[in-house]
Image (cartoon, rainbow, N blue to C red):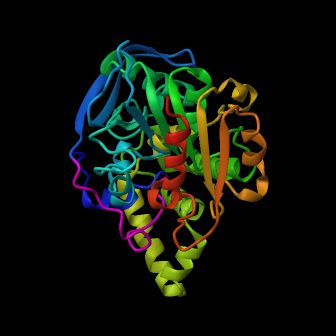
């Protein structure tokens, strides 16, 4: 199975969003997926650069099923968020709710595919050695690599469902308009189908500027993590991804908050690389599916939560854009004791009823 050090298990939400104090249930499940690597040779990036070899790590659960025409009928692609990996979907609050016998994504019925995207997990990334010489990939590059993995390594020519969280949510929109006939259904969780701007752009820019402006970054050739920058990055992650309600409940005093923050920062810096983070955030620079959103022909169940700092409901963007999707529906989850801010996307019990509706409506 995915072998994660104990400290890494704290960070299995999409943007690695909170401390072990705030998210005590985020531990690995007992699932044992099949892991492997695919090498994409002579990979061309949108920037015009190429790499002789791009390694794509992935894991699978279950087995593919095909119809009489040879089309795969039960494949589900799960797409992780910024700084995450496919392992984030193995936590009990996700896998324990969806993957068991009789559950919505029962692995005896579905073929679950968990890729680590370019720049993340065990796939090729700047920290492997190229540092700031790694090609500046974007979301189109990442989706193209996912598509190549499916077709050339796994032999998957059709997807029953793409479910993506945060960055993976944005990838789901890119998939829907780039390969409109490839999937039956899309479930984007915790994002917007428009260019990243406003507050969302500002906090991402703060992260990238903090890394680049730290003298210890040394143009990406540091021997130890640029500590001042990484403290800023950790703080931005904690603010952007956390649930204000839950934080207030679990750390109601100044002392408790400070101790929790110190723990988060310590673990975050130990488990992240500045170049990898810089590239991951920069990858969203030209994301904007809105001009071609009408191309999406799959059924879409788009879900955000009202306590999401990154995708605040008062913008009204989701409600506006979903009208342009032929078979689309948007759901805004109200703030409750069960929501977890941006990280609600990984707590399947909160939104699984909408996944059930999507699977039913998109049945062929």
Is the residue 181 above or below the residue 255 in the image? above
Is the residue 226 above or below the residue 138 in the image? below
Quadrant containing the N terminus in the rendered view: top left
Question: What's the residue at 29%, 35% (across, down)?
Answer: 60
How many marks are shown on the rendered structure?
0
Picture coordinates of residue 284, whole percent (x, y): 60, 37
Residue 343 in view here: no
Picture coordinates of residue 98, whole percent (x, y): 37, 51
Is the residue 169 above or below the residue 136 in the image? below
Picture coordinates of residue 179, whole percent (x, y): 56, 21
Question: What's the residue at 52%, 19% (across, down)?
Answer: 45
Asked whether 70 or 295 is in front, the reply is 70
Asked if the magenta segment contains residue 17, the reply would be: yes
Q: Is residue 337 left or right of residue 101?
A: right
Question: What's the residue at 72%, 57% (across, down)?
Answer: 313
Residue 100 in view here: yes
């Amino acid at each position: 199975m995915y072998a994660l050090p104990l400290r890494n298990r704290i960070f299995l939400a999409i943007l690695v969003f909170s401390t072990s104090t705030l998210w005590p249930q985020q531990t690995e499940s007992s699932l044992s997926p099949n892991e492997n690597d695919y090498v994409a040779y002579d990979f061309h990036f949108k920037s015009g650069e190429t790499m002789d070899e791009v390694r794509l790590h992935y894991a699978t659960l279950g087995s593919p099923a095909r119809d009489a025409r040879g089309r795969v009928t039960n494949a589900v692609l799960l797409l992780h968020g910024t700084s995450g990996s496919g392992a984030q979907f193995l936590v009990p609050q996700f896998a324990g709710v969806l993957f068991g016998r009789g559950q919505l994504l029962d692995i005896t019925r579905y073929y679950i595919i968990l890729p680590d995207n370019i720049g993340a997990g065990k796939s090729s990334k700047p920290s492997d050695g190229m540092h700031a010489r790694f090609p500046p990939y974007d979301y189109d590059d990442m989706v193209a690599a996912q598509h190549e993995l499916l077709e050339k390594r796994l032999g998957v020519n059709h997807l029953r469902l793409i479910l993506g969280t945060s960055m993976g949510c944005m990838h789901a929109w890119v998939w829907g308009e780039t390969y409109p006939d490839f999937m039956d259904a899309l479930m984007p969780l915790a994002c917007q189908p428009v260019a990243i701007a406003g507050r969302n752009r500002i906090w991402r820019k703060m992260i990238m500027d903090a890394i680049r402006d730290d003298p210890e970054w040394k143009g990406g050739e540091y021997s130890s993590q640029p500590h001042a920058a990484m403290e800023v990055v950790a703080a931005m992650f904690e603010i952007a991804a956390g649930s204000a309600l839950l934080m207030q409940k679990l750390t109601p005093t100044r002392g408790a908050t400070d101790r929790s923050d110190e723990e988060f920062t310590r673990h975050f810096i130990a488990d992240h690389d500045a170049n990898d983070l810089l590239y991951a955030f920069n990858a969203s620079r030209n994301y904007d599916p809105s001009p071609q959103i009408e191309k999406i022909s799959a059924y879409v169940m788009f879900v955000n939560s009202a306590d999401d700092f990154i995708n605040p409901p008062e913008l009204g963007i989701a409600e506006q854009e979903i009208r342009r999707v032929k078979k689309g529906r948007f759901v805004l989850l109200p703030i409750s004791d069960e929501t977890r801010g941006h990280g609600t996307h990984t707590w399947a019990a909160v939104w699984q009823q909408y996944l059930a509706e999507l699977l039913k409506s998109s049945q062929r």
